[in-house]
Image: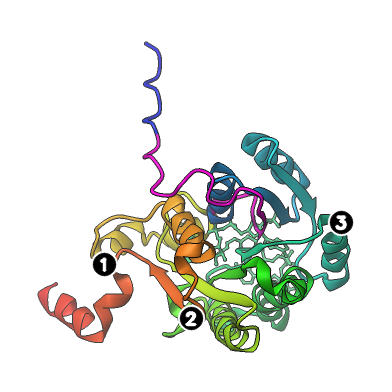
Amino acid sequence: MPAPADPAPAPSAFRSDLFLGRRVLVTGGASGIGLAVSRAFCDHGADVVLLSRNEERLAAAAAGLGPQARWFAADVRDADRLQEVAREVGDVDVLVNAAAGNFPAPFSAMSPNAWQSVQDIVLGGTVNATRAFGEPMLGRPEAGCSIVNVVAGYAWTGAPGVSHSGAAKAGVLNLSKSLAVEWAPAVRCNAVSPGPIGDTEGMKRLGEDLGLADAVVASTPLKRMGEAREVADACLFLASPAASYVTGACLVVDGGQDAVGPFGSMLTAMQA
Ligand code: COA
Ligand code: NAP
C-alpha cells in the first residue's frame, strides 16, 4: 500500500509577496528553526542567504528551497569570514540570528573551553553577524531593515543544566534591546523566544537525550511541542511592516510556558 501523502501545509496567514525584493540572511539557516525561517521568507518572496558551517547540509537545504536561496559556509565565530561574506552578499534587509551551539551539562562538568565555545557561538556569533550584516543597514535608513535574534525562555530565568547557553542568550536578548535604542529609527531589532520545538536538534539535545519530552509537553499549557514553522511566522511578523512600531521586543512562542511562572509551577507541584 502506498504511504499516505503528507498533509498539505496550513496556508500562510501572510501575503505571498510580503518580502518580494528583500534580501534576508539567516545564520543557522540550513537546519531546524533556521531552515523553517529561511523557507518562510522564500515562500513570501524574499531572496534568502543561508549561513552555517556544514556545506553538505547547506547545499541540500538551498536546493530544497529553490532558486531564491543561496548559501555561504562560515563559522559565526570567524568575524573576518563574515565580513568577507557580507562583501559578496551585498545589502541585507533582514538579518535573523538563529545559529547556536548547546549541550546539556552541569556547570561543574563544563571545561573552560566548553563554556567559552557556547559563548563564542551564541553571543560572539550574534555580535559578529550583526556587525557584518546589520551595521551596514544603518547606511540605508529608508530601507526598513530589521534584525531578529532567536533567544530562549531561559534568557530571563535561570538555565540549570545549560548555564552556558542561558548566559549567552541573556546577552543576546540584552544586545537586542540595546541596539533597538542605539540603531533607532534606522533599524529595528527584536528577539523571538521559542519554547520546545519538536523535530529540532535543540529539542533532541534538551528533551529526548535527557528523556524529558513527555514532561515538557505536560508542563506546557498548550500541551504540545511547537513547530518550527510557528517560530518562523513570528520572525515574518517581526520583520514585516506589520511590526513597523515594534522594536526592542521579544516575542515569546512557547505554548504558554513562560506564563506558568512560579505560582503556576507551585500549583502543578501541589496537584502532582
Ligand atoms: N558535555 C560537556 N562538554 C562538552 C559536551 C558535552 N555534552 N560537548 C562538547 N563539550 C566540550 C568539548 O569537550 C570541548 O571542550 P574541551 O576542549 O575542554 O574538551 C568544548 O565543549 C568544545 O567542543 P568542540 O566539539 O571542540 O566545539 P565545537 O566548536 O566544534 O562545537 C558545540 C560546539 C560543542 C556547541 C557543538 O555541540 C556544536 O557545534 N553544536 C551546533 C549544533 C547545536 O548545538 N544545536 C543545538 C542548538 S540549541
Ligand atoms: P539546530 O538545527 O542545531 O540549529 C543550529 C544551527 O546553527 C545549525 O544550522 C548549525 O549549523 C548552526 N551553527 C552552529 N554553530 C555554528 C557556528 N559556529 N557557525 C555557524 N553556524 C553554526 O538547532 P535548533 O534547535 O533549530 O536551534 C535554532 C535556534 O533556536 C538556536 O538559536 C536555538 O538556541 C534556538 N532555540 C531552539 C529551541 C528548540 O526547541 N529547538 C528552543 C529555544 C531556542 P552547522 O552545525 O552546520 O554550522
Residue 212: image x %, image y %? 36, 62
Amino acid type shown at disc 3: Glu
Q: Residue 219 carries which label?
A: 1
The residue mark sitting in front, 2 or 3, is 3
Q: In which quarter of the image is residue 102?
A: bottom right
Tag 1's secondary structure?
loop
**Residue topped by disc 2:** 155
Residue at image location 38% in from the left, 31% down from the top? 8
Residue at image location 27% in from the left, 76% down from the top? 259
| Residue 200 colored in magenta in the image | no
Q: Nearer the viewer, residue 247 or 120?
A: 247
Residue 24: image x %, image y %? 66, 56
Mark 1 nearby-residue class (10 Å; few <14, some 14–19, many ≥20): some
| Residue 12 colored in magenta in the image | yes
Query: What range of the chain is rendered magenta?
Result: 9-32
Report the Cα–Cα distance between label 2 and label 3.
33 Å
- Ligand 1 rendered quadrant: bottom right
152 to 49, vertically: above or below: below
Amino acid type shown at disc 2: Ala
Q: Which mark is residue 88?
A: 3
92 to 108, vertically: above or below: above
Of helix, strand and loop, which mostly describes the magenta segment? loop
